[in-house]
Image: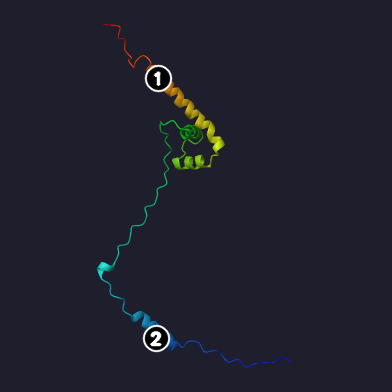
Amino acid sequence: MIATTNATPVPGPSLDNLAAAASAITTAAPKKTRSSQLRPIPNPAPTKRISTVPMRINEKITGRNMCAVEWKKQFPNGTTKEFGAYWKALPHEQRKPFDKLASDAKRSKGSTANAANADGGDDHDDSEG
């Protein structure tokens, strides 16, 4: 045999109480503030533009630029941001050949400049008197 109970419903909030609470919220006067207490809203941080302009490689002799020259051959319309991501992800071991190319280029550039200046830096003939 199953016992039955007579459950008494629990009274909820009355509509009168809810209406009074809503009325109190909507009619409450806002606090008065002086304009000197108001702070200006700061400008939002400027958004970065995503460049779609193809990367340009500068003349500086670095391993990164040497790699960029080769990368541009494969991705002629690639952007600086795209190359930056590629370079950042490139393992150190794969950067070494580009660093060596750069150091060799610097050395050869320095040796040709020294050879040109070995005669005192003049390019004209002083034998004519």
Q: Is residue 58 above or below residue 18?
A: above
Q: Nearer the viewer, residue 49 or 89?
A: 89
**Which residue corresponds to mark 2?**
20
Tell me the quarter of the image containing the N terminus. bottom right
**Distance from label 1 to label 2 (Cα)?**
94 Å
**Which residue corresponds to mark 1?**
114
| Dot label at residue 44 | none
Q: Nearer the viewer, residue 73 or 119?
A: 119
Residue displayed at 41% across by 17% down: 115
Residue displayed at 43% across by 87% down: 17
Where disc 2 sits, the SS reads helix
Q: Is residue 116 above or below residue 5?
A: above
Q: Quadrant of residue 2?
A: bottom right
Q: How is the image coloured?
A: rainbow
Q: Quadrant of residue 117?
A: top left
Q: Residues within 10 Å of mark 2 (few under 14, many from 20)?
A: few
Q: Is residue 35 above or below residue 55?
A: below
Residue 124: give x, y in percent of width and height. Answer: 31, 12
Residue displayed at 40% across by 19% down: 114
Residue 61: give x, y in percent of width and height. Answer: 44, 30
- Disc 1 marks a residue whose amino acid type is Asn
Residue displayed at 43% across by 21% down: 111
Compared across the picture, whether 91 is left or right of 51 comes to right
Front of the two marks 1 and 2: 1
- Disc 2 marks a residue whose amino acid type is Ala
